[in-house]
């Protein structure tokens, strides 16, 4: 049977060490089978909302692997159960949350599915309104910087949510104060039925440049590019250098 998980094998395996490739592959497979099961439960009417991570899971799992779980902070959006999974949220808790059951540690079944949160994992839920994760994420980064911590903050959304005012406020604030925030915009080309070209006349990875924030355009389905691009940026943020995004040849030394 053909593998359900594509690692873009040749290039990925040359650059990325074998143990990392294996861990990435195992975790992506875990997410794949999790999604398959959740799809069935949704069709059975047992889950009220499902946003598949299919095609996003390599970026999500692979980014967590390059960060420090339980030390760094995560403000994901609703299409990111692979973040919760890669951070180590137990499968039982993922299912309890998705099925809106009592005992769900995210919200005891009260919040909308796909809105994971966990105190131990430093994982914070957005609200059902898109874009609401951005300003609290920047506030968290400000608190971490004030405390002298080397922890950094991951915040993300699809390209559609970047049209919202909160995104611009957050990018401006984080850039102005050189806060350790990694903005990860997952551009799958569509915000429900709205294509990217109806969203902006610019390109999503160029928007932040207007605020003085260099942007990187990384192929999130190719782990080699993620593996080479993110670590120097993460390191720089940990050392107090604020936030950066840009092309690999622009990475500040
Ligand atoms: C403030 C607000 N406006 C609209 C919606 C309805 N809505 C939910 S998801 C979505 C599309 C978001 O697209 P994108 O940010 O590109 O993420 P994707 O689902 O493509 O990964 C919209 C418009 C919402 N939840 N909140």
Image (cartoon, grey):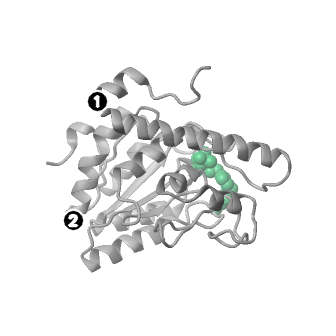
> Secondary structure beneath disc 1?
helix
Left or right relative to 99: residue 172:
left
Number of the front mark, 2 or 1: 1
Q: CA distance from mark 2 to mark 1?
A: 28 Å
Residue found at x 31% / y 33%: 16
Image position, residue 3 (x, y; %): 56, 25
Residue 207 shows in this picture: no
> Secondary structure beneath disc 2?
loop
Left or right relative to 47: residue 210:
left
Residue 69 shows in this picture: yes
Residue where numbered disc 2 is placed: 240
Pick whichever of labels 2 and 1 is earlier in the sequence: 1
Mark 1 crowdedness (10 Å alpha carbons): few <14, some 14-19, many ≥20 = some
Most extreme residue toward the right, as rendered?
Answer: 44
Residue where numbered disc 1 is placed: 15
- 93 or 170: which is nearer to us? 93
- 91 or 242: which is nearer to us? 91
Examine the image and state in which quarter residue 216 appears. Answer: top left
């Amino acid at each position: 049977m053909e593998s359900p998980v594509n690692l873009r094998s040749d290039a990925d395996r040359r650059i990325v060490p074998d143990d990392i490739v294996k861990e990435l592959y195992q975790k992506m497979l875990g997410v794949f089978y999790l999604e398959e099961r959740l799809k069935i439960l949704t069709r059975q009417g047992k889950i009220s909302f499902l946003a598949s991570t299919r095609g996003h899971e390599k970026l999500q799992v692979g980014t967590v692997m390059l960060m420090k779980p339980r030390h760094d902070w995560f403000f994901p959006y609703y299409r990111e159960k692979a973040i919760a999974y890669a951070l180590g949220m137990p499968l039982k808790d993922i299912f309890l949350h998705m099925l809106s059951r009592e005992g769900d540690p995210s919200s005891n079944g009260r919040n909308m599915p796909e809105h994971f949160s966990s105190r131990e994992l430093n994982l914070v839920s957005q609200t059902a309104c898109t874009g609401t994760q951005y300003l609290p994420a920047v506030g968290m980064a400000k608190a971490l910087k004030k405390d002298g911590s080397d922890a950094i903050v991951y915040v993300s959304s699809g390209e559609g949510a970047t049209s919202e005012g909160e995104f611009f406020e957050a990018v401006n604030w984080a850039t102005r104060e050189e806060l350790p925030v990694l903005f990860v915009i997952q551009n799958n080309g569509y915000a429900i039925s709205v294509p990217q070209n109806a969203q902006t006349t610019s390109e999503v990875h160029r928007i932040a440049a207007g605020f003085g924030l260099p942007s990187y355009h990384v192929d999130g389905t190719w782990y080699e590019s993620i593996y080479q691009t993110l670590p120097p940026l993460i390191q720089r943020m940990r050392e107090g250098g604020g936030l950066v995004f840009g092309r690999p040849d622009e990475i500040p030394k």
